[in-house]
Image (cartoon, rainbow, N blue to C red):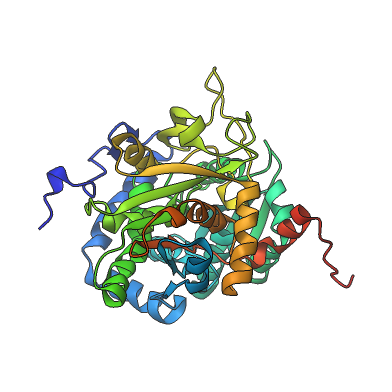
């Protein structure tokens, strides 16, 4: 049995802290809602009926378990490590986001909440939330930055088809940070019937741990699948990070396996040496408070949050989940960055080599795989989380590559 006192899987503590990170920095109006949510989740965690419903929906609605796929041609192209892709882009709605949304919506129903709000960047969390709300007949409002509404138009249309109201946020740069700001403002003014479904491992406690727990189905499946395929655990895990939910989902079940190397890949934008032209908060940021938790943030000398930049809407966030900040500071996980140019190259390689059109988010992880796989031995087992499919990004990619798409208009 794991010694939780010395375990990387023990957190957060009773204050919602992972070391110096996390916590609950919210208004007095929201504190009762946060405490009610924490109490309901603590009850749900030990309720067999809750997990039976989750397991049934994961299997029959989402399509889990997602495959663990040996990427033979990528392995041949890069040389060195044997590369496996965890195919979470094959989930219903096309990304990992629905793993967590199902759990939160089931909690909302247990709490009697009928109005669901969410923030979204790339639109995948918004689509997942709209999907599950449609499944259970709940009102759904999704806040999305105006910049992201423009560059992720296919997902905006999907959300509206599913019955959600999409609110275009024009403050700031009109990206994920601004969408989350407006969602939290809405929550404060609609406390009685509203449940805020946060899409990543950020926000006030209990959200970071709760989202991680729902997403850890990814890593649990990888453990079983790798034992079945190779008879042992992987040597390394790699995942892209914005807020970091797909990464924590993959990493968490392996945190106490000290021989498993863990690598998170942030959005390097136009380069981490370019001020305000990247979203690599662990590389170019420092600790501060945003959206209810203390974590690493991109900020100026006065503590004002910088906007950041990434070609990937899902990674375009000036912070990171607090548990990642803690794993960074303790040294249990490594964090690197990949630029837009490197991610676009990985996008094209994946399409041409494996017949898989990836989202721009996991292309950052694949960009780092391309950098390091060739220097590793052929018996090194590497798992990368393919956390989203690229339908939503084809217009962004085409524009970046200077290709005009004929829409027939």
Residue 213 horizontal/vertical position (percent): 32, 57
Describe residue 295's horizontal placement relative to residue 307 as left or right: left
Who is closer to the viewer here, 40 or 80?
Answer: 80
Who is closer to the viewer here, 312 or 182?
Answer: 312
**Position of 407 relative to 285 (above/below):** below
Quadrant hosting residue 323: top left
Residue 16 horizontal/vertical position (percent): 29, 40
Identify the residue at the far bottom of this view. Answer: 60
Instruction: Give the residue displayed 61% in from the left and 63% down from the top.
Output: 349
Who is closer to the viewer here, 222 or 232?
Answer: 232
Instruction: Give the residue displayed 15% in from the left and 43% down from the top.
Output: 6
Q: Quadrant of the C terminus?
A: bottom right
Who is closer to the viewer here, 292 or 32?
Answer: 292
Do we see residue 360 in this rendering?
yes
Describe residue 219's horizontal placement relative to residue 67 as left or right: left
**Position of 52 relative to 156 (above/below):** below
Residue 341 horizontal/vertical position (percent): 65, 48
Quadrant hosting residue 327: top left
Describe residue 259's horizontal placement relative to residue 306 as left or right: left
**Position of 172 relative to 248 (above/below):** above
Quadrant hosting residue 202: top left
Instruction: Give the residue displayed 56% in from the left and 24% down from the top.
Output: 304
């Amino acid at each position: 049995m794991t010694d939780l006192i010395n375990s990387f899987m023990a957190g957060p503590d009773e204050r919602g802290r992972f070391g110096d990170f996390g916590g609950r920095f919210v208004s007095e109006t929201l504190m009762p809602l946060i405490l009610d949510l924490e109490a309901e989740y603590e009850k749900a965690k030990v309720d067999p009926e809750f997990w039976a419903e989750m397991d049934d929906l994961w299997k029959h609605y989402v399509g889990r378990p997602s495959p663990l796929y040996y990427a033979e041609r990528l392995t041949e192209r890069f040389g060195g490590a044997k590369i496996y892709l965890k195919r979470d882009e094959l989930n219903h709605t096309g990304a990992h986001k629905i793993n967590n949304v199902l759990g939160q919506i089931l909690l909302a129903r247990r709490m009697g909440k009928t109005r669901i709000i969410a923030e979204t960047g790339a639109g995948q969390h918004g689509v997942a939330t709209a999907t599950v709300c449609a499944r259970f007949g709940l009102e759904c409002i999704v806040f999305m930055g105006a910049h992201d509404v423009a560059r992720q138009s296919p997902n905006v249309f999907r959300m509206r088809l599913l019955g959600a109201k999409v609110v275009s946020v024009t403050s700031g740069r009109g990206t994920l940070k601004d969408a989350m700001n407006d969602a939290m403002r809405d929550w404060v003014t609609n406390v009685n019937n509203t449940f805020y479904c946060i899409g990543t491992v950020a926000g006030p406690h209990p959200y970071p741990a709760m989202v991680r727990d729902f997403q850890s189905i990814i890593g649990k499946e990888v453990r079983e699948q790798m034992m079945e395929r190779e008879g042992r655990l992987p040597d390394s895990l790699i995942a892209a990070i914005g807020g970091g939910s797909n990464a924590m989902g993959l990493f968490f079940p392996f945190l106490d396996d000290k021989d498993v190397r863990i690598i998170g890949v942030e959005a390097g934008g136009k380069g981490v040496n370019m001020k305000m032209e990247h979203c690599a908060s662990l590389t170019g940021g420092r600790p501060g408070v945003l959206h209810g938790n203390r974590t690493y943030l991109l900020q100026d000398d006065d503590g004002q949050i910088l906007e950041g930049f990434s070609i990937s809407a899902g990674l375009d966030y000036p912070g990171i989940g607090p548990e990642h900040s803690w794993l960074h500071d303790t040294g249990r996980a490594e964090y690197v960055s990949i630029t837009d140019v490197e991610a676009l190259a990985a996008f094209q390689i994946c399409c041409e080599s494996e017949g898989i059109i990836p989202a721009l988010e996991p292309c950052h992880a694949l960009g780092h795989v391309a950098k390091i796989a060739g220097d590793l031995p052929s018996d090194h087992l590497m798992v990368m989380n393919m956390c989203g499919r690229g339908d939503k990004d084809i217009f962004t990619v085409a524009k970046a590559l200077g290709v005009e798409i004929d829409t027939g208009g």
